[in-house]
């Protein structure tokens, strides 16, 4: 087998329709570097070391030998790893600089988006049956779990959901159909909701808990990441992509 050259790799990237995505990644890095330079942001050795330690922990790279082996498998060098850490820390620092003061106002305005519910759901294709089962559960003639095991159809909701008694887990508003989220998030837990008709299906839902969001460190980091990602998307949208890609095309064909 012949040696794979850089031009072979580039050709594969183009043929797999990943070329625009790769270019977007390059431009994103340039945007971060440019704005960090404008704001005179610099990184310390301690910050980079902390990021490297977290990276190795996340990838279960306990020893130096494991790290070197992993880098080799990925086709990366130690210099590449250092560049990766540098960009990661620089991006985080830029995000903090740009949006740290905007996290609390954003959270206050979008609290509903971060509210979650713990719920169970049974989807029935017979509205009359759904209403009958609703009253049976309400009158304690049966349980939601028993109804779920008997009436959940694997082809609609899946075997695993039937085994879990209809347990959907912890969900955000955006993860529910609009017709369902309006009713679910307006209810008080714990509560069995009257069947909700969506198209031809009746949704029988037991709302176990409503989880009100708190601006803890994890959610703060999530919001900061979301704000930074939106900002970066706007920056990318301002680029002259046809001109940029046209300029790169002759080089990629060389």
Image (spheres, rainbow, N blue to C red):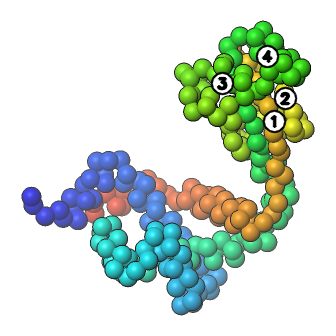
Label whose residue precedes the other's in the sequence (1 or 4): 4
Q: Are marks 2 and 4 in contact (CB under 8 Å)?
A: no
Q: Are marks 1 and 4 in contact (CB under 8 Å)?
A: no
Query: Around disc 1, counting alpha carbons within 10 Å, would you say few (fewer than 14), some (14 to 19), or many (20 or more)?
Result: many
Dot 1: element:
strand
- 3D distance between C-alphas at marks 1 and 4: 16 Å
Which residue is tagged 1? Answer: 207
- Upstream in the sequence, badge 1 or badge 3? 3
Residue at disc 3, secondary structure? helix
Picture quadrant of residue 221: bottom right
Q: Are marks 1 and 3 in contact (CB under 8 Å)?
A: no
Q: Is residue 179 left or right of residue 228?
A: right
Q: Position of residue 12 (x, y in %)?
A: 26, 53
User: Of the residues under marks 3 and 4, which one precedes in the sequence?
Assistant: 4
Residue occupied by mark 4: 133
Residue at horizontal 36 percent and vertical 54 percent from the top: 19
> According to the image, label 3 marks what residue?
149
Image vertical order of residue 65 relative to residue 178, above or below: below
């Amino acid at each position: 087998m012949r040696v794979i050259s850089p031009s072979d790799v580039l050709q594969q990237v183009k043929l797999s329709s990943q070329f625009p995505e790769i270019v977007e990644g390059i431009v994103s890095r340039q945007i971060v570097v440019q704005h960090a330079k404008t704001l005179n942001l610099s990184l310390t050795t301690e910050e980079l070391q902390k990021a490297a330690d977290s990276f190795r922990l996340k990838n279960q790279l306990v020893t130096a030998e494991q790290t070197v082996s992993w880098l080799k498998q990925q086709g990366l060098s130690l210099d590449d790893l250092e560049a990766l850490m540098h960009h990661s820390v620089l991006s985080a620092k830029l995000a903090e600089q740009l949006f740290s003061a905007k996290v609390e106002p954003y959270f206050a305005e979008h609290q509903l988006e971060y509210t979650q519910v713990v719920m169970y759901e049974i989807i029935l294709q017979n509205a009359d049956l759904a209403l009958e089962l609703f009253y049976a559960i309400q009158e304690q003639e049966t349980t939601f779990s028993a109804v779920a095991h008997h009436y959940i159809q694997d082809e609609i909701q899946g075997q695993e959901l039937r085994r879990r008694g209809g347990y959907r887990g912890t969900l955000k508003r955006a993860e529910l159909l609009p017709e369902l989220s309006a009713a679910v998030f307006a209810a008080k837990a714990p509560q069995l909701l009257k069947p909700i008709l969506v198209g031809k299906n009746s949704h029988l839902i037991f709302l176990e808990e409503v989880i009100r969001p708190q601006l803890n460190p994890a959610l703060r980091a999530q919001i900061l990441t979301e704000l930074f990602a939106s900002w970066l998307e706007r920056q990318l949208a301002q680029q002259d992509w046809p001109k940029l890609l046209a300029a790169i095309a002759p080089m990629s064909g060389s």
